[in-house]
Image (cartoon, rainbow, N blue to C red):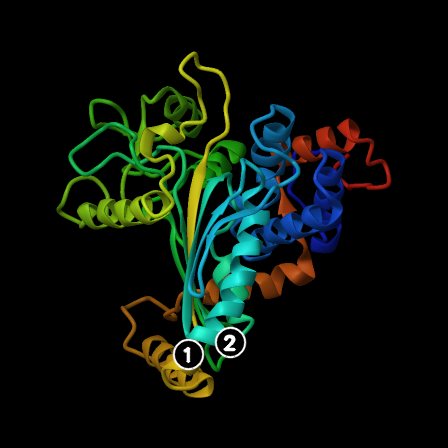
Amino acid sequence: MSATVHHVPAAVLKSFMADALSAAGVPAADAEFCSDVLIAADLRGIDSHGISRLKPIYVDRIRDGVVNPVTDVEFVRRGPTSAVIDAHDGLGMVASREAMNYLITQARQFGMAMAVIRNSSHYGIAGYYPLMAVEQGLIGISGTNARPSIAPTFGVENMLGTNPLTFAMPTDEAFPFLLDCATSVSQRGKIEVYDRIGKPLPPGWVIDPQGNTMTDAHEVLEALVRGQAALTPLGGIGEELGGYKGYGYATVVEILCAALQQGAFLQALYGRSRDGGKQPYHLGHFFIVIDPQAFCGLEEFRHTAGEILRALRNSAKAPGCRRIYTAGEKEYLTMTERSQTGIPINASLQQDIIALKHLYRLERYHFDFE
């Protein structure tokens, strides 16, 4: 097998992922949607949340009985501008689609709406769901809690998940404003990417129980599972560079994801039973959709948002810096490029793809790296 990075067309990878999920027991329409969420990450350069997650986070968890392949989406409470949804340990992506479809309809009628989901699982890139709102001329906000990874400021125990707080807004440019990032300096998925390519982590991303920085990606991933490592909150170690801000925002997401739907939180999200066995993660998500028409009008909003972004990009640049970016711009540029060149697949990920191909006898797929 070649150790080189190979580029595979996005359409091929998307079809492969849908077929693999279907073979794992996911209904065809749901498998198609999940593969769309995953390929959206790869196209945007968010390699930590694309096909690299297919086997370990979705297929393996279905096979282990941790995630139900058929998602029973139950609206426990439903009001004109609010909803509480139980995913019954199914696929977070499927439950989130149902939540967003409901909120988009309700926000158009009432100006805004919010929903929370309980008993869910990993829902892919958080930005996918706010972008669903943007495609309808609406503003989208989402967040999710996750298995514990972040230590609170002045602490060393992993208590909070990487808990992204994500916003997407329509603009009059070729791409929307999209802020989709974790509330930690980095996230577990990016560490998995570093581990796959054998690259050391930058100092300050992860600390050990003594508060010392850790840089071996493989060692960090194992230590995170044992609770012997913790990610630092956005801003880094201590308060000097604002680590308390990332800690605070991660807590905001945790509260919104758990308290409104009365679900599991913090270390109850480990995905392990008292005897150490695997169990569902019971994650929570929240979503907010806002209709600009209720405030000013869509075109006026889009134009003002675009003016703000253009002013930021045209502001004075630091010496040696060629350009200033706004949130979502780099991802848009990467998507434009990868739509032509394909998705880069490294040697470790090639092994996962081949393993799934043989496991589910998807022999109609032929990859250059086999």
In the shown orientation, is residue 131 left or right of residue 228?
right
Q: Are marks 2 and 1 in contact (CB under 8 Å)?
A: yes
What count of labels does the image hold? 2
* Mark closer to the chain start, 2 or 1: 2
Assign the C terminus to one quadrant of the image. Answer: top right
Q: Residues within 10 Å of mark 1 (few under 14, many from 20)?
A: many
Farthest-out residue, left: 240
SS at circle 1: helix
> Disc 2 residue type?
Gly
Task: Name the foreground residue: 49 vs 107.
Answer: 107
Assign the N terminus to one quadrant of the image. Answer: top right
Residue 174 at least partly seen = yes
Task: Name the foreground residue: 361 vs 317.
Answer: 361
Q: Quadrant of residue 310?
A: bottom left
On the image, the x and y values in percent for residue 345 come to: 64, 43
Residue 178 at least partly seen = no
Name which residue lies at 68% across and 62% down.
Answer: 340
Task: Name the foreground residue: 288 vs 178.
Answer: 288
Disc 1 target residue: 292
Disc 2 target residue: 137
Q: Residues within 10 Å of mark 2 (few under 14, many from 20)?
A: many
Farthest-out residue, right: 364
In the shown orientation, is residue 74 left or right of residue 273?
right
SS at circle 2: loop
Above or below, 148 relative to 256: above
